[in-house]
Amino acid sequence: MDFDFSEAQRRRYEEVLAGVRGQVKDLVGPRVPFSREEWLAAAGLGMTGLCLPSKYGGGGLGALDTALCLEAFTEGGADSGLAFAIGAHLLACAVPVRDFGTDPVRAELLEGMAAGTLVAANAMTEDAAGSDVGTLGTTIVRDGGDYVLHGVKSFVSNASTADVFVVYGTSDEKAGFLGQTALAVPRDLPGVTVGEPFTKMGLHACPAGRVEFADCRVPVRYRLGAEGQGNAIFKHSMSWERSCLFALYLGQMRRQLNECVAQAKRRRQFGRPIGAFQAVSHRIATMTQRLESARLLLYRACWLLDRERPDAQATALAKLAVSEATVANSLDAVQIFGGLGYLSGTGSEAQLRDSVPSVIFSGTSDIQREIIANGAGL
């Protein structure tokens, strides 16, 4: 086993760190949905095309290198909501187009996705289909050279700013998990209506909302994979999302830990730095343990993916470890900062709010435990 970065990985990590720190004002705006200027600033660092083929302007990176860049992005100070929006665009949308789109559709979409001129949104979740994605009410019906798409999607990340949606729906009600189909749907097609962004607890820079498709006619060429392959395509995209996207929380936790150590050295009570008290130093030790354990699990899941050995249990272990670590560490950070940690604008409370949804999206913690238990033979 080799636990060290290669020289190329180390250099790329440092380049992203330096790039973010050099234009942090463009990547950490007010906590509202990201602007096109912020998105393009991230694209200028290569973030919107990390794992897309170089022939389309992407970085040509594998899963581990993609995760390392997302980690460096947030460690450098980029907003976690913006990083999440990029991860959703890249991993839940661009990856399915990359791996299952026809050559003409790849040529039409991937270059813009890599350059940041096209924003993508994943439309899977519905009001009655969250963890149980096998019960999609959205229908996809073949009619000549088109598919007629009808239904309402919810919690669509990037919805209000998206130029294209990756949509999953039921094409054959009798076929079960083999009856779902995936489409890339340009926003400007008739029958697409995008709702206002939800008011959320955290990740404010990433707008999420409802999207309605009312008898929307989608040319057959926009189908991803074969008809009925939608469930497999979604699982493939989730293997990338659960392995790579959560690296943004590794970067947030690393920055957070550095801030806590600095606060423990700076803040004095009872005549000495609060870091001299075990109640604080041991809290920081536990935060470090959570971070490093989660990082190793995530790196392993990405390593397996890069070797074409995707492992559902390894991915679930990584997702569960990172998401629960970032919530626990954020609670500890609030404690270390005390009253300041409770105030808006000082960082700690925002980190906590951004962390909480990590145990819900991309499969809840309970769903990850089910996958892990199944992998154990239960």
Image (cartoon, rainbow, N blue to C red):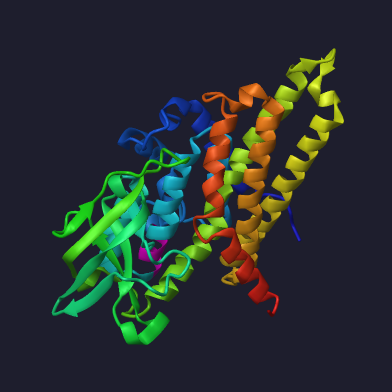
Q: Relative to 85, is 61 above or below?
A: below
Residue 69 can be seen, yes or no: no
Camera-side residue: 302 or 230? 230
Q: Give the quarter of the image for residue 176.
A: bottom left
Residue at the spot x=38%, y=34% of the render?
A: 32
Residue 88 can be seen, yes or no: yes
Residue at the spot x=36%, y=86% of the render?
A: 175
* Image position, residue 243 (x, y; %): 56, 59
Taking 38 as reference, is 344 left or right? right
Q: Residue furthest front?
A: 128
Q: Relative to 321, is 227 above or below?
A: below
Residue at the spot x=32%, y=44% of the render?
A: 197
Taking 284 as reference, is 56 left or right? left
* Image position, residue 366 (x, y; %): 60, 63
Main secondary-structure element of the magenta-colored stretch: helix
* Image position, residue 211 (x, y; %): 27, 55
Q: Residue furthest top?
A: 271
Q: Does the segment drawn in magenta span residue 98?
A: yes
Q: Tally the marks.
A: 0
Camera-side residue: 40 or 121? 121
Q: Does the segment drawn in magenta span residue 187?
A: no
Which quadrant does the N terminus fall into?
A: bottom right
Residue at the spot x=44%, y=25% of the render?
A: 25
* Image position, residue 119 (x, y; %): 32, 49
Which quadrant does the C terminus fall into?
A: bottom right
Q: Write down the region rendered in magenta.
A: 94-99
Q: Relative to 204, is 293 above or below?
A: below
Taking 106 as reference, is 372 left or right? right
